[in-house]
Amino acid sequence: MIERLETYAASLLVDWFAARSGKPYALASSVDGDVPVFVADAPGGRLALAVARLWEPQADPAADDARLAMEERLDAGSVRGPYLVWVPPRAAVPADEPDASDFVLRVQIVAAPMLPGARGEVDLPVQVQLAKMRDEGGYASVIGGLSRWWTAITERVNGTFHVNSARLRRAPQSPETRERLFDQIGEASRALNVGDAVEFDTVESWTVQRLREDPLGARGFAIAQAPPKIDPADGTLMRRLVRKRLKDAAAALAGVEADVKGVGLIAIYEYAEHENVGSFVKSLDPSLYTGLQLVAAIADGEVRPIFQPRA
């Protein structure tokens, strides 16, 4: 049985291709298999897409069971429509109370007013730890979700500090919101003496989007979540998964009649602009995708083309 995640990802890719080609492609049918295949039609054209996840759900059965259970809980609420929740790397939806109920409430509050095609973020409470190591220097060592902004945090401290943001897997998309968090860290640092540590509350932000329509009649919530132990920066693992998905997709599409054949690879990254699936695809034997005119990554609610038809 095809899960809503693959159907919703196919819908996003079809919408992107329709906008690029200027033709009103719409999903028409699907075929289940190791790699599901979706067919979209437009006047004078047919698009066939294989859609696959760049992870193995069985790598963490407990986390995947919690994901499926959370989809059911979200579906049971008063919010209707096709929604897709993107869980950042190394994170998972909560399975225990009261966190699970709090998550449901927060997602539904964000989703309820969203118009078709809109996207937003659900803020989840987390804690960041700050410790002062020395009076000398002006440096902050940062681990966790804020590590890519260590220079911006360093600019706000006097002395040597350590910031542990391991519980914060995805900072808000808004640069202004992130700047306020960096200012908060800077203010907290000024009250610390050497050897002191403080933990303060902030939020991490997960992407939520509403699809433009009910693809193939599918409604409700789908959650894109890779096993928390998977690291998208693990080149060996990702290259192996990409190779297998492309090989299986080519086989699944072999008997399908279409003007354009393509593959959508669902990937988990903090932000779409940081995905690097294309580098793994291009490092493989080109014969794996010679029969495909379209290869794209679908990450954090966005379509990121790797190869696309010239016309």
Image (spheres, rainbow, N blue to C red):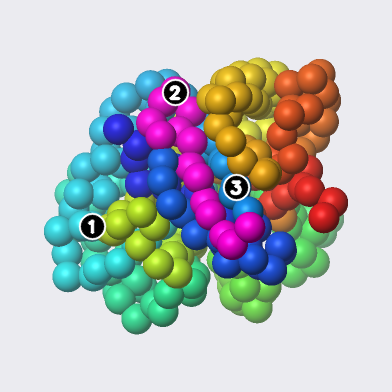
Residue 139 spot, x, y in % from top left: 79, 55
Q: Which residue is farthest front? A: 44
Judge left or right: residue 242 versus residue 124: right
Secondary structure under tag 3 reads: strand
| Pointer 3 with pointer 2, Cβ within 8 A | no
Q: Residue at x 43, y 52 (%)?
A: 28
Residue 272 spot, x, y in % from top left: 65, 54
The residue beneath circle 3 is 47
The residue beneath circle 2 is 34
The residue beneath circle 1 is 74
Which residue type carries mark 2? Asp
Residue 31 appearing in the image:
yes
Q: How many marks?
A: 3
Q: Nearer the viewer, mark 3 or mark 1?
A: 3
Which residue type carries mark 1? Leu
Residue 41 spot, x, y in % from top left: 53, 54
